[in-house]
Amino acid sequence: NAGVTQTPKFQVLKTGQSMTLQCAQDMNHEYMSWYRQDPGMGLRLIHYSVGAGITDQGEVPNGYNVSRSTTEDFPLRLLSAAPSQTSVYFCASSRSTGTFSYEQYFGPGTRLTVT
Amino acid sequence: GIQVEQSPPDLILQEGANSTLRCNFSDSVNNLQWFHQNPWGQLINLFYIPSGTKQNGRLSATTVATERYSLLYISSSQTTDSGVYFCAVFNSGSRLTFGEGTQLTVNP
């Protein structure tokens, strides 16, 4: 198993550009999510999905879009990049352990800089 | 939403020392995980521990769900233990909420 993979590892964007961060998992997990981590802080939830075709907003969804057409893939789209979106982005895939209960596994992260 | 507080925020140890990290949470939770973020930024699962005690080598964790806290014990610390330790909880909202972490530095 490759686990959770993310591409690219690093990206530099100019303000106003758009791009898609890719995330894939091969563990057949239903639950996937995206987080951002700013310097010296914990992780904050952007969007999550409890299965193909189902997505919902997290704590900081503005400026980001997601879709889930397959179980394996959960891309994150930046619509019009802003310097405030400079951060490290982590994708996670989660094994269900009961009702509203998951064990999460994280990808290696994408370091994004917006100039 | 649920609040997750970790203490201490920073901890400096000499190699070989033991330490205890604490995580308090403000509401009942469905599960709790401890993660280690190494100096390269990788997030590594340490424990999935909604209740009870687990051990893995020099690390162990205890969660007392009724009293809303969890403890992570590191014994005989090594320089490779350095990094940030995060506690994260799932409650009924289907969201994992992270604490702000404990920055651990182990000096040789």
Image: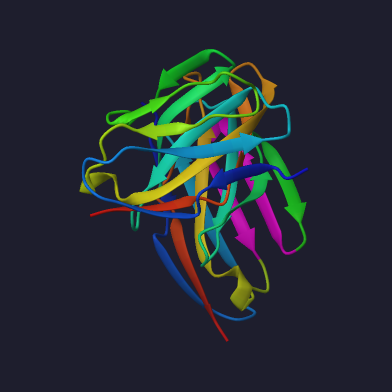
Prevailing secondary structure class for the magenta stretch in the rendered image: strand
Magenta stretch: residue B59 in it?
yes
At x 56%, y 60%, the residue is: B20
Q: Is residue B2 left or right of residue B42?
A: left
Q: Quadrant of the C terminus of chain B?
A: bottom right
Q: Nearer the viewer, residue B64 or B1?
A: B1
How far across and down, in percent of the image, does residue A34 sit?
47, 35
Q: Is residue B59 above or below residue B24?
A: below
Q: Quadrant of residue A12?
A: bottom left
Q: Quadrant of residue A59?
A: top left
View extreme (top): residue: A53
Mark count: 0
Q: Is residue A87 left or right of residue A53?
A: left
How far across and down, in percent of the image, does residue A93 sit?
61, 34
Question: Which contiguous range is marked in magenta?
Answer: B58-74
How far across and down, in percent of the image, does residue B55 sit?
75, 52
At x 47%, y 19%, the residue is: B93
Magenta stretch: residue B30 in it?
no
Q: Quadrant of the N terminus of chain B?
A: top left
At x 74%, y 47%, the residue is: B54
Q: Quadrant of residue A78?
A: top left
Q: Is residue A22 above or below residue B12?
A: above
Q: Is residue A17 left or right of residue B43?
A: left
View extreme (bottom): residue: B108
Say if residue B18 shows up in the picture.
no
Q: Is residue A1 left or right of residue B92?
A: right
Q: Nearer the viewer, residue B10 or A48?
A: A48
At x 46%, y 40%, the residue is: A21
Say if residue B58 shows up in the picture.
yes
